[in-house]
Image (cartoon, rainbow, N blue to C red):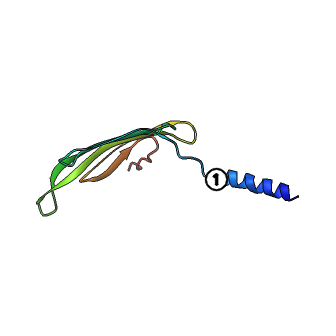
């Protein structure tokens, strides 16, 4: 009886253990002196991300110049139903903007 309890305990521990995270196949980050960058990675389970940042000077609310980093990129993955998904995005002085099939679209008026 004790052996059965021990076996069930070991099986429960094995089932409850979190899965290993996917390995990173490639990853790079190139920081540029003026503030821009290029970043990308790919994992063994098919996740891919590419992103570029570049410095831009904009005017703030008081019409004073300030530097912001404009970001453009995309990421791809396979959803739980097995369908490939890609999201393209950018972020600038107007905010974060993303589009892709998995991103809800606002209702049209």
Quarter assignment of residue 73:
top left
Within 10 Å of the Cα at label 1, are there few (<14), some (14-19), or many (20+) other Cα atoms?
Answer: few
| Residue 70 seen | yes
Residue at image mark 1: 17
Quarter placement of the N terminus: bottom right
Q: Residue at x 36, y 46 (%)?
A: 98
Residue sitting farthest toward the bottom: 62
Residue sitting farthest toward the right: 1
> Observer-nearest residue: 62 or 18?
18
Where is residue 38? Give x, y as percent. Answer: 29, 41
Quarter assignment of residue 3:
bottom right
Where is residue 96? Give x, y as percent. Answer: 32, 51
Where is residue 23? Give x, y as percent. Answer: 50, 41
Q: Residue at x 53, y 41 (%)?
A: 79
Q: Residue at x 53, y 36 (%)?
A: 83
Q: Is residue 106 left or right of residue 70?
A: right
Above or below residue 94? Residue 80 is: above
């Amino acid at each position: 009886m004790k052996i059965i309890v021990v076996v069930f305990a070991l099986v429960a521990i094995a089932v409850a253990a979190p899965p290993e995270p996917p390995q990173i196949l490639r990853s790079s980050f190139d920081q540029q002196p003026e503030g821009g960058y290029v970043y990308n990675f790919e994992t063994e389970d098919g996740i891919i991300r590419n992103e570029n940042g570049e410095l831009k000077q904009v005017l703030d609310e008081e019409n004073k110049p300030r530097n912001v980093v404009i970001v453009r990129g995309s990421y791809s993955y396979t959803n739980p139903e097995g369908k490939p998904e890609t999201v393209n995005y950018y972020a600038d002085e107007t905010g974060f903007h993303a589009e892709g099939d998995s991103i809800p679209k606002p209702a049209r008026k």
